[in-house]
Image: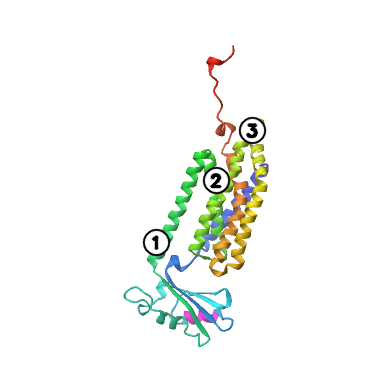
């Protein structure tokens, strides 16, 4: 705890940088949120992304998103709803695959194979975004209630600040590198919230236990003792989890890639925030032994004169 100020300055700088990138660059939302068409095409040789992008711009698509998908031969193309013409969306609201195929692969030639075409309406994307925010708020409120009932309100406040620190930093990474933010990444963010608070609860429980066992330790010494006692458990638990996440990252393919990336960032910063963000905040909120261990009232009738 003697280095608490240094670590919290680092946390504040990292948090501020993440917020800056979120406001300045924004998230690269997938078509699941924005609505539009997702086209996956496979070329017989390495695809020229710039040529594909220029060809789409030439036929009237303002901002096509073109990127490699897995290999240099696989290309993922995203079209916004505003770029679709009436002939490409039927009167029943369904996608005309043939019209979209001819539009997207205008310069593809015979060496292009269409792997899939998916359409997501803007209303569906808006509902998914709203439901995601609601789910995030429910998780936060539930964690605060749980910690306030199990420990004390100071623990609830510090844990939520630390957990939001993790969430914002994950979003900051995705904004900085413009990684695709999809529903699977949102699921990873919610998983990190629960995962991170679990580590905080373990540290908080050791703090309460140390308060009960020792009356001579100061609050900083008690927190240091609690952190030291959980170090081996933290290394084993987080190390084992990270091995599993790395297997998804390297062998899970494109579908699980960004899900695993979000979990990796969350695990690393979850350890940091639980130990070096939540614990100092509890100390600075004025935690005392009396907050967790209530003094025993003596019955005057049985007191000796």
- Label 1: state its secondary structure: helix
Q: Is residue 21 above or below residue 147?
A: below
- Label 3: state its secondary structure: helix
Tell me the number on the disc at residue 159: 2
Q: Which residues are magenta?
A: 50-56
Which is nearer the N-term, disc 2 or disc 1? 1
Q: Which residue is mark 3?
A: 213
Q: Is residue 216 above or below residue 25?
A: above
Which is nearer the N-term, disc 2 or disc 3? 2
Q: CA distance from mark 2 to mark 3?
A: 24 Å
Measuring from the top left, give residue 148's x and y in whole percent.
Answer: 50, 40
Q: Quadrant of residue 91?
A: bottom left
The residue lying furthest to the left in this view is 91
Measuring from the top left, give residue 187's x and y in whole percent.
Answer: 50, 59
Q: Are marks 2 and 3 in contact (CB under 8 Å)?
A: no
Nearer to us in this view, 53 or 296? 296
Q: Is residue 136 left or right of residue 225?
A: left
Q: CA distance from mark 2 to mark 1?
A: 29 Å
Tell me the number on the disc at residue 76: none
Tell me the number on the disc at residue 127: 1
Nearer to us in this view, 167 or 194? 194
At a point 53% along the width and 55% down the height, the residue shown is: 191
Q: Which image quarter holds the N terminus?
A: top right
Q: Nearer the viewer, mark 3 or mark 1?
A: 3
Which is nearer the N-term, disc 3 or disc 1? 1
């Amino acid at each position: 705890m003697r280095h608490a100020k240094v670590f919290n300055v680092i946390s504040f700088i990292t948090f501020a940088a993440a917020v800056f990138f979120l406001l300045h660059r924004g998230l690269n939302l997938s078509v699941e949120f924005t609505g539009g068409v997702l086209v996956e095409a496979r070329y017989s040789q390495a695809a020229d992304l710039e040529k594909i992008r220029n060809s789409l711009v030439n036929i009237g698509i303002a901002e096509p998103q073109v990127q490699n998908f897995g290999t240099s031969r696989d290309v993922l193309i995203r079209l916004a709803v505003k770029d679709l013409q009436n002939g490409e969306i039927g009167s029943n609201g369904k996608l005309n695959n043939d019209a979209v195929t001819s539009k997207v692969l205008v310069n593809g030639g015979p060496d292009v194979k269409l792997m899939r075409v998916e359409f997501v309406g803007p209303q569906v994307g808006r509902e998914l975004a709203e439901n995601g925010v609601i789910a995030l708020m429910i998780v936060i409120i539930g964690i605060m209630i749980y910690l306030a009932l199990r420990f004390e309100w100071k623990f609830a406040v510090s844990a939520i600040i630390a957990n939001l620190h993790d969430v914002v930093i994950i979003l900051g990474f995705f904004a900085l590198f413009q990684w695709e933010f999809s529903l699977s990444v949102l699921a990873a963010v919610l998983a990190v919230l629960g995962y991170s608070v679990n580590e905080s609860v373990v540290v908080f429980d050791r703090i309460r236990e140390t308060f009960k066992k020792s009356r001579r330790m100061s609050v900083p010494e008690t927190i240091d003792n609690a952190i030291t006692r959980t170090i081996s458990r933290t290394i084993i638990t987080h190390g084992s989890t990270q091995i599993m996440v790395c297997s998804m990252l390297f062998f899970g393919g494109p579908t699980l890639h960004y899900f695993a990336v979000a979990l990796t960032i969350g695990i690393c910063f979850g350890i940091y925030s639980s130990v070096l963000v939540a614990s100092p905040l509890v100390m600075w909120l004025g935690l005392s032994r009396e907050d967790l261990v209530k003094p025993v009232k003596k019955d005057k009738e049985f007191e000796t004169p």
